[in-house]
Amino acid sequence: MKRIMRYFLLLTVLAMMAETVLAQVQKYKELHQVKRKETIFGIARENGITIEELVKANPEMNTPGYELKKGDYIRIPYPSGEEPQTATSAAPQQPQMPTKGTADKPAGKDMRQREIRLGIMLPLHNNDGDGKRMLEYYRGVLMACDSLKMQGISTDVRAWNVAEDADINKILKDPNAADRDLIIGPLYTKQVKALGDFALAHDIRVLIPFSINSQEIYNNYNLFQAYQNGNQLNEAYVQRFMQRFKDCHPVLIDCNDSTSTKGGFTTVLRRRLEQEGIAYSITNLKSSEAMFKKAFAMNQRNIVILNTSRSTELNVAFAKLNGMLTTTPGILVTMFGYTEWLMYTRSHLDNFYKFDVYIPSTYYMNPLSPRAERIRQKYRWNFHQDMQSYHQRFAVTGFDHAFFMLKGLHLYGTHFTGASGMAGYTAIQTPLHFERIGNGGLQNRAVLFVHYTPDNKVETINF
């Protein structure tokens, strides 16, 4: 009991750290959606401002690796000497969809002109793995609030420990829950409907951050679901595969793994290849060298796909491919892998580079990037320990989620849909962009490829 009380006290202190003064009013002339081939220099010149003025209005441009992308929204400040207006008059006019239920949230200024009220409803305890991971995620959220404060975006944060056996209906009776603008949670499917209904009644946006098997996303307009299920990801990965490797010869390798769960992906891929009239080859890890080589094209690049993600079979595949290159050095080979391969870099990195490996995923943080190092240092400084050694760093996911959502709500208020480019934020690890599902909620569609290039570099290709 004493241990639990200590953690509640810790959470209270962290929440108080995140509470800040009233948000400063953003002063800019308009929001500009970036067009193809536009540059920072060109946009500044066309609007009669200096590059320095444009960058000052858009602090994210100072982020290492920032790129101006088509579809992004950026703020255009007033030229020196002109009278600024408030963010309310500059906000884009979009049709407001009616919310379901009766919103009885306490009256207050538009969240674009005040602090954003954030609620966290996750298992925030130290009793099991879920709690420990969500505590780390929550710390990342607080770090995002602290970073946003430097951009003049203030937050009022309140957190509730919503464990797996908690009755969320009792928690929702807390008067402080009804005045939130955004709630991040829950972690468990059985708690989604109650929170979703509550969000509709009080006109609150809800970000569901992790795996949920609920149908509420299809009929609740206020839900943002970050998680994508396996079927959705298979379709997304195949679509991007077809775009990226349309000029390659696909070679599918049967790895004889009866425990593999990758049949869903290879089935969708084969169906799509056949629909497009693209010929492909199938071979086996146990095939002779001659039969194995026969599956490969000699006059075009081959894209190799295994039907398992296990490291053991991957090691055998690399051995087969290296042997083939020794006897037939002219064959061109690229490999398309699975998210699990990101855990194998320590043992397979040289082959990842050699075979031009692409790994599909929904998250990736380059461990050598300056932003990754800064957030690791900030976490260590704030909490006097390192992040847990999961491949997906939950604190960084919390940071990305909170920064994206809070900045978007600050810019657009209730009009924020999380569409690509709206928030003007480049994720450190976990990208988001949402699309509306009919008349229901918003589903994250962001995926990426991690590419290990033959010149020993790693690039992230975001979609």
Image: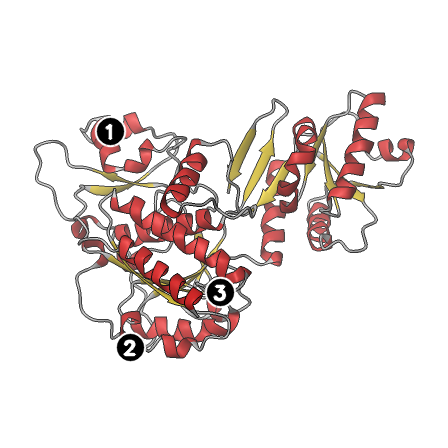
Q: Nearer the viewer, residue 374 or 361?
A: 374
The residue sitting at 43% across, 43% down in the picture is: 427
Q: Nearer the viewer, residue 149 or 31?
A: 149
Q: Nearer the viewer, residue 255 or 76?
A: 255
Q: Amino acid at mark 2?
A: Thr
Q: Quadrant of residue 55?
A: top left
Q: Which residue is mark 1?
A: 44
Residue 212 position (above or below residue 273): below
Task: Evaluate if marks 3 and 2 touch, with contact meaning CB atoms under 8 Å apart.
Answer: no
> Residue 121: x percent and y percent?
40, 66
The answer to whether residue 452 shows anywhere in this view is: yes
Q: Secondary structure at mark 3?
A: loop
Q: CA distance from mark 1 to mark 3?
A: 44 Å
Residue 50 position (above or below residue 445): above
Q: Which residue is mark 3?
A: 187
Among numbered discs 1 and 3, the one appearing first in the sequence = 1
The residue sitting at 50% across, 47% down in the picture is: 393
